Structure formats: structure tokens, C-alpha cells
Image (cartoon, helix red, strand yellow):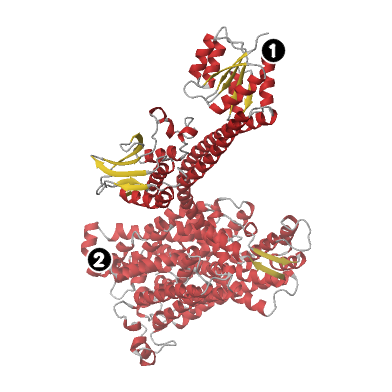
Amino acid sequence: MLPANLVVLVCLAYVAVLFVVAFVGDRRARKNPAGWLSSPLVYTLSISIYCTSWTFFGSVGSAAKNGLEFATIYLGPTIVFVGWWIFLRKLVTIGRTYHTTSIADLISARFGKNPALGAMITVLALVAITPYIALQLKAISASFQVITFPAGAVAAAAGSLEPDFAIAFWLAAGLCVFSIIFGVRNIDVNERHHGVIAAIALEALVKLVAFLVVGLWVYLALSGTPEEMFRNAPVSLLNPQQSFGERWVALCFLSGAAVICLPRQFQVTVVENSSEEQLRTASWMFPLYLFLINLFVIPIAMAGLNFLPEGTDPDLFVLALPMAEGQGSLGLLAFLGGFSSATSMVIVSSIALSTMISNHIIMPIAMRFSMVPTGSSQNVRSFILVTRRLSIIFIVFLGFVYFWISRTSDALASIGLISFCGLIQPLPALVAGLYWRRATHGGAIAGLGAGFLIWCYTLFLPSFEGAFVLSSDVIEHGLFGWSWLRPHALFGLEAFDPLVHALFWSMAVNSALLIGVSLLREPTPLTRFQATLFIDIFRRQTESELGVIRRTARVSDLRQIADRILGPSEAVQLFEHGAAAEKAVIASDELISQVEQRLAANVGAASARSLVSRVVTDETISVDELKRLAGEAEQIRAYSAELERKSRQIEATAAELAEANERLREIDVRKDEFLSQVSHEVRTPMTSIRSFSEILLNNRDLDETRKLHFLGIIQSESFRLTRLLDGILDMNLMEPGMQPWEATSFDPEDALDQAIATCEPLARAAGASIIRRRRARNARIMGSRDQLAQVFINLISNSIKHNSNAEPEIAISGGTRKTVYELRIADNGQGIPERDRDQIFQKFYRGQQTRHRGVGLGLPISRQIVERFGGELGLSDAKIGGAEFIVRLPLHQP
Amino acid sequence: MSKARVLIVEDEPNIVESLSFILGRAGFDIETAVDGAEALQRLRRQVYSALILDLMLPGINGFDVLRSVRSDGELKDMPVIVLTAKGQAADRQAAEAIGATAFITKPFSNAEIVQRVSELTGG
């Protein structure tokens, strides 16, 4: 044992050192904000307030009782810092960018700056943290007794030692003073608490060194060789059956979530963060710290179980072992380590919670009753500072009262995990807030509220074992005696232990309600806007750039608020140098946003909005703009895929167009050619007509025979013109090349039947008879049936029209020969002379004169079509006297 | 003075007849050919004061005839009046490029034909 006075003295000296460090840290940081105090090392050490006295003393205790289970509490954070780096980075960036003051502020800001949400999280945190603070006070008080009383550890475990009221009280008071002096210097929460952080970092080192030294001593002096150590180890310690079950998974999840959600962790990780580099270092250094501080847990637990008397509290092995071996100074070091871990937790927790209480509970109430905007600026600022300081005192003494009331019960022993389970209830809202645009404040409130209630009912209240609110009867048999409402077996779920059970139900209902209620209603425009800012944080938009929120406010009104909350010096900076430098009467959207952001850094987003809203006369949030922004990120991804698809489409279309264009060009050339030919064909008879008319006009002396001859020429050339026009009309009917080429397999005899039927009236009029001779059987060809029918019509009608026989006759016979379908159309007209036969297929061929009775345009076009079928159109003498047209087409073999 | 002799190369019989009539009345001596081959034959055998040449002829066409005339040492300065029923600027340019002296589009005015032939034959 050590003399109590000595211990007190050492404690005071240590606290004095902390004060000096904090003081120097503050001074240095003010001179050089980028100095070593902003280094990643200090940042990482400050994060290690995760390791409270619950770690320092409790790890060994847990190991002695439950074996390896203690490791889960550090495995979760390790997984988060290494594996969830992306999430942490996003969270920290949002906190830094929007000057977030606490987890309550971040979530309330995300869900439309909803004040109720912030207040709920604050209340929840206060309820869950009070016993946790009590635990720290108890740890210090108990550890003090262990080293100042003989056989203190055994006595403390037996509960026979009344904790010293004075020690606990003055400790609590001292913590309040420290937190108030260094934690609440300015109302701007984002002005980092360098002094506090410096002291916390020192404490982190002290607790690590103390634990390592004690562990090393235990290992070297007491355990003997590793083989001996493990041989002597109690079976329960290394019993693997207790590990790796659902409790193992639950604890990993719980601790991983806690390292994000605990108010003090959020304070040091997010609020105090000044650069991404800090976080990058912490992502490996913090897990390393956790590893080191747990390195000797098992040896110490083994040694404690082996060497210390039966009944010694395992939670105090770290202290009891050196004391039992007469190592007073080692005991004192261990005491200081525990003291450090407990005090740093209380200090940061109280600072973080005081901000939350002042920003999310007191400010909204004060504003509701119009207490804030009145009075001089200094009054408002000091009002906020006073509320923060009083909040700290309130928090710490709430913890103290809790500690004092429960000092003799065991209720505190498991409070760490119970507290964790309550404090992680904001997790679903936080994760949804960072990744799910559709999440609404209604969903967050419903989920959080339900999670909180379930936690209270299934875990927190039952932890009092019937002493508080819930009677032991209710805990045993359920509310109103309904067994399905038993706190430890909700809805009959009995498979899990109480912690896993509570975690399961609270998280399941919390998440389900968050999603379900969110889906019921569209997010409000402001929520949607905040969602865009938070979810797309790495796209670095500022509110004014977005141009979503349009507000109208007078500069003087804004200035008044800024003066009161920010203080005159910062207000001057904001208004003289910022967006308001142009001295307008009506503030720009940018200025309003700037003022609101600065206010948010002090009083939280919800209160800042509420303050600004008082002087804003007109606010519109462009939902279209919002939707555009919200959709943009997805749109860009979707867009690039769409672009690719479109560009492929466009390429295909371009190819089609090029092809179509080529076709059109061809048609155009053919059209020009055609027009030129038509022009030629029209001009030729017109030349004769004009020339002979002029001759007749100018030569009145001509003899009658000559006159008649010339008039005859004029007449016949006129007829020729008429025929020509008929030919052009025929051709229009055919429209070769203009129709899409539909290739189908069909029987050419069908096309022939169709053609004959069409020509029947013409034949009757001319008194011609069409004789059907042979028919081809089962012939099939590929192509367009209608076009082939047109060819046949053309050939048959030609044979009818140009047949000079008194009894015109057209004989048609079809047949197949090997792979060819052959159709012959013969007439008994005057026939076509050998030398004209090639030319007859040329358009307007020059042999086509009156004596041949021009065959028009039909033949050349018919030949074209037949050639497109891959066939040929020929001409020979018919047996019956006239001409015979022969169509040959390749048969289609399916 | 003896009559100027003009060769008409044209495959359209009615046009040949009308040209022969007008130019005959105007005092020219007319000979005709119905295609390019016949025209070249006649040009080789006989000297003409002018040539009236249709461009669209079966077989050897008007362009070919004109080219032969211009590349022939004796005939190269002979006036050639090109007749065409196409009337497109491109044809006219092509004909002038290979040495047509005049270019008349069908249907023509009888007076114009007589006037051009008279001018070119020094009448």
C-alpha cells in the first residue's frame, strides 16, 4: 500500500502537468496552428481516448472472466479504421467542410437541419453516457483504494470499502474545471481545442506506457517461461468455446459502430480533424495502438488468476499485481495510467456533450422564447459559453450522482457495452445520411426513437435489476405480464444473451423504420439539398455555386445576428471582406450561406438555420435544380454508358445514312440522266415540228404535195411526242429502284397469272387473244413478286400494243430448265429486226422510230429489274411470226 | 460562184429532210450522212464548205467525228456547226473544247441555221 497523501500529491502533480501542457498547447497552437499539435501522431493519440479505464482495467477483467472476448472491443475499431477507411474519410470530410460540431449536428444537418433530431441524439447520448462517466469515476475511486488500503483489491471486490466521497467529488470537480478552462474557451466549436488535445495525447501516452510497463514486468517477473505461463493458465481463460459465437460478431459490430458514433470519438475524429493526412495516418496507427495496449492483457490476467488471492476483483489485476508484489512505484504508474484513461474520457465526453446540449437543447429552447436575439452581442455569446460550462458541470455531476447512488451495486460492471449499444443508435441514420438520398428526417427520427426505446427497455433499464423504473417482475415476466414483452426475450426471441438480443432488436427495428418511414414520403427540398451536399461531398460544391436555395434578407439584419453570435471581430471580417464587401442593402445568397455556415460552426446547423430564417423574408428551394444536382452523379455514370450506346447507335445510323446517301446519289445521277434523255427525246420531234412549221409559214409558194408531206411529218412527230409521254407515264408506274427491294421466295407463275389478269382488259380492247401454253411446276424464285409482275405486264402489254396483225395473238409458256425458270412471251406481230434488238432495251433508243412503233421506256426498265433478280431478258423471233421475249430467272433452292 | 457544199450528219430522217430543204432553198449544195461512219467516208472523198453535225449518232458519234475532223490536216479548219437535242451546258463546253465552230440547240430556228451557215461559208 501507498500513503494516500502521496497518491493524492502525485495525482495533483500529474494534473498540474496536464494543465501546463494544455496551456502551452493552446498558446503554441495560437501562434502556429500548423505545428506539431496538428500532426497525425497527436491526432491518433487523441483518438485513443477510445481506451478508457474500461480498457485499462476492464480488458484484463474481461479476459479473466470471458477469455478472448475482450479482443472484440478492439477488433471492431480496427476493422473500421482499416476497412471502412472510405466511410471515415467521407464522414471526416463532411465534418470539416461543413464545420460540424457533433454527431447530433451532423445528422440533424443532413436531415434538413432538423432540430428535433439533434435534440433526440443529445438526450440519447446523455442517458447512455452518464453511467459510462460514473464508471470512470468508480474506476479511479476504486483504484485509489487498491493502492492506499491493505489488500484493497480484495476488499473493493467484496464491496466492504465505502468509496471515498471526497476523492470522487474533488476528482469530478477537477475534471469540470479542466474541461471548462480548456474545452470551452470559445463558442466556435471548430476552433480546435489544441490544449485539450495536447493533454489528451499525453494521457494516451501515459496509459500506454503504464500498461506496457506493468505487462512487461508481469511477463518477465511473474510468468516465467511462456510454456509455464500457459501451463498454469486457468482453463476458462483460453476456452475457445466461449468465443467466435454470435456474441463475438455482435461485439465486433458494436465496438466498430461505437468508434464512429460515440460523442467523444466523433469529437476527436471528426470535429477536431484538420486534414485528411491525419486520418490517413490514424488508419494504421490507431489499430497499432489498440494492439499494443492489449498485448499484455492475457499474461496479466493469467498472472492475476495464479498469484492473487481468491476473490480479488479481476478488473483491478493491473493494479493489484504490482501492489501484491510490493512494487509501489509500479503500482503508482499503473494508477496514473488508469487515472489518465478515465480522466481523458470524462474530459472529452463532457466537452462533446456540452456542445450538444447547448446547441441542440438549450439554443432551440432559448430561441423559441426569443431569448437569444435580444440584448447586446456579448450577452448572447456569454450566454452560450455559460450554458456550455454549466452543461459540463451538469454532465460530470450527473455521472457523479449516478456513481454515488450505484456505488455498492455491480450495475456498473457491464455498463460499457450497455452504453455502447445505446450510443450506436444513430448509426443507421448516419450511414443512410452519407449514402442514401431517399432517407428522410421522418425515417431517421422514427428509427432512432424506436432504437432508443428498445435499448432502454431491453438493456438499459433491466441493467438496474429492478431498482429503476422496470421492476424485477417486469424483467422476469414481461410488461403487463405479457411474456412476449420480456425485456430479454422480446417477441419470444430467447436464443441470444441480453446484449446480443438488445443489439439485434434495436438495430433491426431502427434500420427497418428508417427505411420504411423514409419510403413513405419524399424528402423535403432542404433534406434533399443537404443530401446532395453530403453524399456528393467529394464533388466540392458550395451552396452558392449550386444556386438551389434563394433567400432574401437585409444585410443589416444578418450583421446583427453575426455580431451577437460570432462576436464583432469575426462579424467585421465576414462583412467587410467577404461577399458583402459591396455594401448592398439586400444580402446575396452567397453572403447568407456564409453567415449561416459560420453560425453553424458555433451553434450547430439547425440553430444556425433557425437564426438566419428569422431575418430571411423569402426562401425558395428550387426542387428542379436539386433533382438535377442529386441526379447528376448517377446521371454522369448513366450518361457515359448511354453515350457509348448512343455513339454505337450513331455509328450504325451514320453507316445507314451513308448507304442511303449513296443510293440517293445513284438515283439522282440516274434521274439527271433520265431527264437529259427525256429532254433529248422531246426535242427531237419538236425540232422537226418547229422546222417544218417554219418552212410552211415562210414558203407560201410550196406545192400542195409538199405541203401535205410536211404536214404529215408534223403530225407523225406529234404522235411520237404523245407516245413518248405515255412511255414516261408507264415508267412512273414501274418506279424502278425507288421501291425497297423485298426479297421473298415465290412462284413466278403466280406473278404471271396476276400480270395476265391485269392485261386482260387491254387485250380485249385491242381484240387480241392471250394464249396460256405450258406452265412451270413448283418453280420458286427469290425477289419481289410485285416487280416481277410489273415486268410481265410490261412485256405482255407491249406485245398487245405493238402488234400490227389483224388478229393479234400472244402466246405465253413457262418452264424450268435445270436451275433456271424460263418464260416466253411470243406475238404474231411484225417482229423486231435483228439489228434493233440490242437497242430496243436502251432507254429512248435511237432506232425507236415511227416505223418500229417505239416500245417506250418499259423494256429497259424491265430488263433492269430482271437483271436485279439475277436473270436475263432476251428477244428472238417467235414461231408464230412476231417477236418473242424470253425471261430467264435463277430458281431459288431452299 | 459555185454553190457552197454543206454536209449534214443526222440520223433523224425528218430533221435531215427539213435541213436539206431550208439550206437548199438558201442556195447551198447539200449532202447527207445518217451516221458517223458514213460522214467520215464522205469527208474523205469530198471537200465541204461546212459540216452540220448531230452529236447523238448511232455507232461513231458526233464527238468522234469532230475529233477526227480536227485532227485531220486538210479538214481541221473546216467550220463545224454542232447540233444537239440535249442542250446542256456541259455538252456545249465539251463540243467547243474539241473544236466546234458553232453550237445550235434543237429545236432550232430555220433562219438561224441559214444565217450561221452563210456566215461560216463566207456567204
In this rendering, would A506 be left or right of B72?
Answer: left
Image quadrant where one finds the N terminus of chain A: bottom left
In this rendering, would A246 be left or right of A786?
Answer: left
| Residue type, label 2 | Leu
Expressed as whole percent of the image width and height from the top left, the position of residue A53 reads: 43, 68
Residue drawn at (30%, 58%) of the image: A219
Expressed as whole percent of the image width and height from the top left, the position of residue A44 reads: 47, 56
Query: Which is nearer the eye, A478 or A650?
Result: A650
Residue A421 appears in view: yes
**Mark 2 belongs to which subunit?**
A
In this rendering, would A661 be left or right of A562?
Answer: left
Where disc 2 sits, the SS reads helix
Q: Which mark is residue A238?
A: 2
Expressed as whole percent of the image width and height from the top left, the position of residue A109 reads: 57, 68
Query: Which is nearer the eye, A209 or A722?
Result: A722
Query: Which is nearer the eye, A668 or A73?
Result: A668
The residue positioned farthest toward the bottom in the image shown = A480
Residue A591, compared with residue A410, is above or below; it is above
| Residue type, label 1 | Gly
Where disc 1 sits, the SS reads loop
Expressed as whole percent of the image width and height from the top left, the position of residue A728 reads: 51, 42
In this rendering, would A375 be left or right of A98?
Answer: right
Where on the picture, by quarter, is residue A287? bottom left
Q: Which mark is residue B122?
A: 1
